[in-house]
Image (cartoon, rainbow, N blue to C red):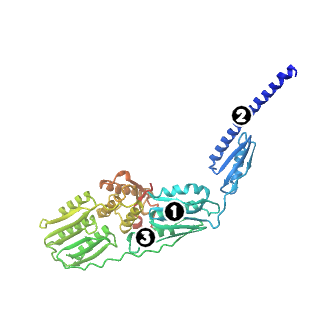
Amino acid sequence: MSLLTKWLIPGVVAVAAVTGISLYSETTKIEADLTSRAENVLASKDMDWAAISFDGRDGVLTGIAPEQGVSAWAVELLDVEWGIREVEDETSLLAEQKPFTWGLERDDDKLSMIGYLPYDLFKTAADKIKAKFNDIELSSSVEAARGGPAGLEKVVDFSSDLLSVLPTAKVMLIDDRLTVSGALEDGNAGHVALYKAIKEKIDTADLGVIKPDLQISQPKEPAKAEPVEAKPIDGFAIKRTAEGVDLVGLVPSADIKTAINGLAVRKFGSSGVNDNLMVQEGELIAGLGSEEYNQLASAALQAVSRLGIGGQASLSQDGLAMTGGAFYEGALQKLQEALRSALPANLSLSSELSVAVPGEAVNPDECQVLLRSALEKNTILFDSGKASISADSFGLLDGLIYTAHRCPESKIQIEGHTDSDGDNFANQLLSEKRAGSVVDYLIEAGLSDERLEPKGFGETNPVAGNDTAEGKAKNRRIEFVILAQ
């Protein structure tokens, strides 16, 4: 072997080896760069279903495309990315389900979700549903699929809203039909109110092509208490009941009886007054003349409205006797002061009043039902055209405060609404001020301001027509809404 050959061949081999290593290293860098930039392109379009790999500058797209055409769009996006020569589409298409089914079921503190959802909704539905429930476990066997009707995101939101207030129920979608099934208890006033609210929500739902079908039987109304037999006592007895108030005894004139009934309706609602008062025209009742009687009966009625069930005021020749539990300490002090102020000098006051024992804690859903039920029976009243709360509504507010203490972790939005009379801007401002007045009352009574959020809606959310006095009265309202946390 010549000297030249001896030195040349090893040199060529070494150069070739170094060149090969260099080219391999450079190719690896190019592939890594293209992969990184391609993944960023896919991520920017939420194409997390897709994967990309490169051999040199040629790519292969894989994954399960959620809809027709999206893989072709992904390829188009990658083809224009600098440095990529060609991308081959090796994706498959997500399976289509016919019939398309989805369901959400609640059994007290457990939730389960079954069926299918479009890919994008499949990724987010569980978290959105969990956000509406506190401390409720959600199990899901849902899979992504094609073939669902339009508007499924609304359906999931609508269904979770329903189940957030129904303790035991099931919502099931089969193609374009959404059934709501479950059971409510006969004779349960809260369940009667809940059924009405659910039915209204379903009747007014806008779910596009999907038609909701309520398959929950309407619960029977609670049995009405037997009328209290009027007793010819020389005085009166005013007693707080679960339905409202019982009025028994004598009144010195028909006009005073009418006035007392009017006050009772304002304090307890039109359906909550059981009147068994008897008129003894022109006579002294328990030794009181008409004016003194009227003043004392009005004060006693106000005091009883601020007591819990069983609270009572009784007038006799011996004086005025009060028993029962106020909803909180401040209410107890104020009603005692008002009674002493209204009591005639010749009558004594016997008081066995205290602060009611706190109610058992309830979850936010149950709390919402209790709040809504109370406001369906009666309405928070304000002085005409003003934001100042009528004293006739102090008892209703005290009861709402007592309920709010039973769900101490829940935040509550206080919503003000008006009818359509007058200027839109003025109505909006009035609704905001009235909501603020209610929040101030609640804070003064001991609720934390961090739990309360006032909001005015003006005349924008009517619940009845504004063409009748009755409809306008329904639209002038305050609502308590538990906020999702």
Q: Which residue is mark 2?
A: 25
Residue 214, image x, y percentages? 51, 71
* Residue drawn at x 21%, y 63% as measured from the top left: 353
Whether the residues at callouts 3 and 1 have beta carbons within 8 Å, the answer is no
Is 397 above or below relative to 227? above
Instruction: Name the amino acid, label 1.
Output: Ser
Q: Secondary structure at mark 1?
A: strand
Residue 148, image x, y percentages? 62, 63
As measured in the structure, the alpha-carbon distance from the residue carrying label 2 to the one carrying label 3 is 83 Å
Q: Secondary structure at mark 3?
A: loop
Instruction: Name the amino acid, label 2.
Output: Ser
Q: Which residue is mark 3?
A: 468
Sequence-first disc among 2 and 3: 2
Q: Which residue is mark 1?
A: 112
Q: Secondary structure at mark 2?
A: helix
As measured in the structure, the alpha-carbon distance from the residue carrying label 1 to the one carrying label 2 is 52 Å
Which quadrant is home to the N terminus?
A: top right
Instruction: Name the amino acid, label 3.
Output: Thr
